[in-house]
Image (tube, rainbow, N blue to C red):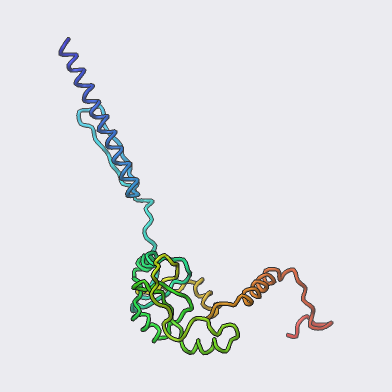
């Protein structure tokens, strides 16, 4: 009888060990899934046999690969990401995401010498915010009322910014992404200088009327023809 009790106790102890091991194992699996974003399917076979088996399957079907952005890979160059949306460290990370880095002031100067210009500050290497303005463009601005002081002076505008939390765009150096349809549309329709408050108000009126064009009537060319053509 004593031997039977001992055998029973040993069996219970063995099951307890298995259950505790299973509990710890599940905690580890859940930790791996949480911290590494990996989907793991685990199961135990032959639990009540002398040799239980643990079956682990890493699920890879739903893992989405990094999206590859088409690039112009002839040579690295300076390219600007507009928008006052990025702190200095965020701008560095953004350029890194494109496979590049922040452009140096020397690289900005070289880009300017090749014709680069954009009227928008961008974080650059050394915690500088810079943008290039071509002399020909600057001369044209002097002839447009209200835009004489737009886009700074000819050359590289800007300098060191002590506060890295100020938000600018980013001047990156690396292989520039190929132009998307949206970027082409913006390039074809954008102005080389920022609009004045009066021009923005007028543009809002244009946008309003453009949206409501179907509501308006147009007169015929004369009493007999709709159009001259």
Q: Residue 194, located in which quarter of the rendered image?
A: bottom right
Q: Residue furthest top?
A: 1
Q: Residue at x 35, y 75 (%)?
A: 103
Residue furthest out toward the left: 3
Position above or below: 160 against 30: below
Front position in the image: 90 or 75: 90
Pick whichever, 41 or 139, lies toward us: 139
Query: Which quarter shows the C terminus?
Result: bottom right
Of residues 118 and 51, which is closer to you in this image?
Answer: 118
The quadrant holding residue 165 is bottom left
Above or below, 36 against 95 in this view is above
Q: Residue 222: percent from the left, percent from the top?
A: 82, 83
Q: Position of residue 129 (x, y in %)?
A: 41, 74
For residue 46, side relative to residue 148 (left or right): left
User: Residue 136, percent across and down?
Assistant: 49, 89
Q: Position of residue 69 (x, y in %)?
A: 40, 67
**Nearer to me, 222 or 157:** 157
In this picture, is 74 found above or below 97? below
Residue at the spot 40% in from the left edge and 77% down from the top edge: 159
| Residue furthest front in the image | 162
Q: Residue at x 40, y 75 (%)?
A: 79
Residue that protrudes farthest toward the right in the picture = 223
In this picture, residue 97 sits left or right of residue 194 = left
Where the N terminus falls, by quadrant? top left
Q: Quadrant of residue 126?
A: bottom left
User: Number of marks in the image?
Assistant: 0
């Amino acid at each position: 009888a004593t031997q039977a009790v001992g055998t029973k106790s040993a069996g219970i102890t063995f099951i307890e060990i298995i259950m505790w091991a299973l509990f710890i194992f599940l905690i580890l699996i859940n930790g791996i899934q949480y911290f590494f974003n990996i989907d793991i399917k685990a199961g135990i076979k032959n639990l009540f046999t002398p040799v239980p088996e643990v079956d682990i399957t890493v699920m890879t079907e739903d893992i989405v690969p990094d999206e590859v952005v088409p690039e112009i890979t002839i040579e690295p160059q300076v390219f600007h990401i507009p928008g006052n949306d990025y702190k200095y460290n965020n701008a560095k990370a953004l350029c890194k995401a494109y496979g590049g880095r922040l452009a140096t002031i020397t690289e900005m100067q070289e880009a300017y010498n090749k014709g680069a210009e954009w009227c928008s500050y961008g974080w650059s290497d050394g915690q500088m915010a810079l943008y290039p303005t071509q002399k020909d463009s600057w001369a044209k601005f002097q002839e447009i009322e209200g835009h004489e002081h737009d886009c700074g002076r000819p050359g590289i505008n800007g300098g060191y910014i002590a506060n890295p939390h100020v938000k600018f765009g980013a001047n990156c150096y690396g292989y520039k992404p190929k132009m998307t349809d949206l970027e082409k549309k913006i390039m074809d329709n954008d102005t080389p200088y920022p609009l004045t408050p009066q021009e923005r108000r007028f543009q809002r009126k244009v946008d309003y009327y453009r949206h409501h064009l179907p509501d308006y009537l147009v007169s015929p060319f004369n009493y007999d023809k709709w159009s001259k053509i």
